[in-house]
């Protein structure tokens, strides 16, 4: 298994543009998490899904951020419109719902908004 | 509220010296605590969890409920221990709350 797959690995965009980040969880995992990593705030949970259903989106910064999980093998995180303060590394992780604490992380997407 | 505090952004030690990465938590119930590590150019990965009471790569961590702490310790640091370390807490549900992270630099 290749583990959690994220694309793109790097994204540079201009302020105001729409950005879509993609994630493929490990096959068989039924929980999926989106995190944002910055030097100032560390690793913040944005949203997580159990069995494709959003369970907690309290970490989503504002309405510009949205996430979907149309099926068990794919999720997207969209920022529209993007702003320079959104620049960060975005991680996707997956786990078994019963596997508390053992989350498997993707390589991350480094987003730069100019 | 669930909160994890790692007071040090950066910890720099010499090779062979003892290491202690501090972690304090806030949670009203019985938490499960974890340490995650991110080596350079590698993915964030689970290092150890308190319920296992295990030693991984020479690291141990003891949950102290009285002090609400879960400090990560190693008696003799090695250069390959240089990495970003995150303390995490699992309370309700299967989500994790992470601390801000501590960069450990082991100097030769």
Image (tube, grey):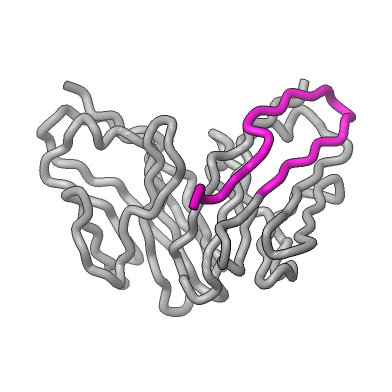
Residue sitting at 45 percent across and 63 percent down? B89
Residue B26 seen in the current view: no
Residue sitting at 30 percent across and 67 percent down? B50
Query: Where is residue A90 shown, x and y percent of the image?
Result: 63, 41
Q: In which quarter of the image is the C terminus of chain B?
A: top left
Residue A78 seen in the current view: yes
When asked about the image quadrant of residue A57, the answer is bottom right
Q: Give the range drawn in magenta.
A: A1-23
Q: Quadrant of the N terminus of chain B?
A: bottom right
Residue sitting at 22 percent across and 68 percent down? B53
Q: Is residue A35 left or right of residue A103?
A: right
Q: Is residue A4 magenta?
A: yes
Q: Residue furthest front?
A: A1
Please, is residue B89 above or below residue A4 in the view? Answer: below
Judging depth in this view, the residue of A17 and B62 nearest the camera is: A17
Numbered circles on residues, count: 0
Q: Is residue B63 left or right of residue B88?
A: left
Query: Where is residue B59 shown, x and y percent of the image?
Result: 21, 51
Judging depth in this view, the residue of B97 and A101 nearest the camera is: A101
When asked about the image quadrant of residue A74, the answer is bottom right
Query: Where is residue A1 shown, x and y percent of the image?
Result: 49, 53
Please, is residue B104 above or below residue A14 in the view? Answer: below
Residue sitting at 73 percent across and 41 percent down? A21
Query: Where is residue B102 shown, x and y percent of the image?
Result: 39, 40
Q: Does the magenta stretch include residue B22?
A: no
């Amino acid at each position: 298994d290749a583990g959690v797959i994220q694309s793109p690995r790097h994204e540079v965009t201009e302020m105001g543009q729409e950005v879509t980040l993609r994630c493929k969880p490990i096959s068989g995992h039924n929980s999926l998490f989106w995190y944002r990593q910055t030097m100032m705030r560390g690793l913040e949970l944005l949203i997580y899904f159990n069995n494709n259903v959003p369970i907690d989106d309290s970490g989503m910064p504002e309405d510009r951020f949205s996430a979907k999980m149309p099926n068990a093998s794919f999720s997207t995180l969209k920022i529209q419109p993007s702003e320079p303060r959104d620049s960060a590394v975005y991680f996707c992780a997956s786990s078994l719902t019963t596997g508390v604490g053992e989350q498997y992380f993707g390589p991350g997407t480094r987003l730069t908004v100019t | 509220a669930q909160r994890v505090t790692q007071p040090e952004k950066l910890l720099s030690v010499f090779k062979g010296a003892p290491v202690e990465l501090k972690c304090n938590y806030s949670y009203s119930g019985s938490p499960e605590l974890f340490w995650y590590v991110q080596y350079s150019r590698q993915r964030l990965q689970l290092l150890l969890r308190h319920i296992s009471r295990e030693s991984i790569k020479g690291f141990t961590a003891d949950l102290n409920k009285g002090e609400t702490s879960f400090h990560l310790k190693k008696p003799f640091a090695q250069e390959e221990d240089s990495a970003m370390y995150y303390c995490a807490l699992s309370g309700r549900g299967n989500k994790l709350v992470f601390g801000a992270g501590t960069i450990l630099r082991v100097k030769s």
